[in-house]
Amino acid sequence: MKCPFCGFGETRVLDSRVDSSGFTVRRRRECLKCKGRFTTYERYEFGPIFVVKKDGRREKFNREKILNGIMKACEKTPVTLDEMEKAVDNIVDTLQKSGNLEISSVEIGKLVMDQLKRLNEVAYVRFASVYKDFREIDQFLEVVKELKSNK
């Protein structure tokens, strides 16, 4: 690591800490030449993730789209915004840990459904009705029966 004060190429680490998100390491460093102290931050660098739509189109992954879908499904339920944000964080974390640079919209939909099932059953059914493109009442009944049998 190059010293920002004198440009010398050797420093020593005085202290390292991981931040609360677990994705950033903060390091206090000291230049071996001028004794100047400075802080560096190391973060994971993830490549861009592309979503492969049902029709084959590809678009850049957008966290906000996931959050908006979850917010619509959770309208008029007791689910807090903080809980919704955590659900989205879990989905994004799963996608990034997969290491795949392309993921199908179907796979993302399954991840959203898994999170909603844990958050609120009504939100789960709402999202499922759009995600699975329900056209008949029997499709709703199947989802409700599935939820009841898993209890």
Image (cartoon, rainbow, N blue to C red):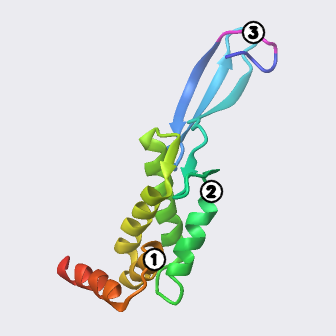
Write down the residue under mark 3: 8
Q: Can residue 105 be seen in this view?
A: yes
Rendered position, 150 above or below 109:
below
Write down the residue under mark 2: 62
Number of the label disc, if any, that sits on residue 133? 1
Main secondary-structure element of the magenta-colored stretch? loop
Q: Nearer the viewer, residue 86 or 138?
A: 138
Q: Is residue 81 visible?
A: no
Which amino acid, by three-letter code, is at mark 1? Asp
Residue 33: image x %, image y %? Answer: 73, 8
Residue 87: image x %, image y %? Answer: 46, 65
Q: Of label 3 and label 2, which has the lower sequence position?
A: 3
Which amino acid, by three-letter code, is at mark 3? Phe
Number of the label disc, if any, that sits on residue 113? none
Rendered position, 118 above or below 52:
below
Q: Which of 60 and 26 is in front in this view?
A: 60
Q: Nearer the viewer, mark 1 or mark 3?
A: 1
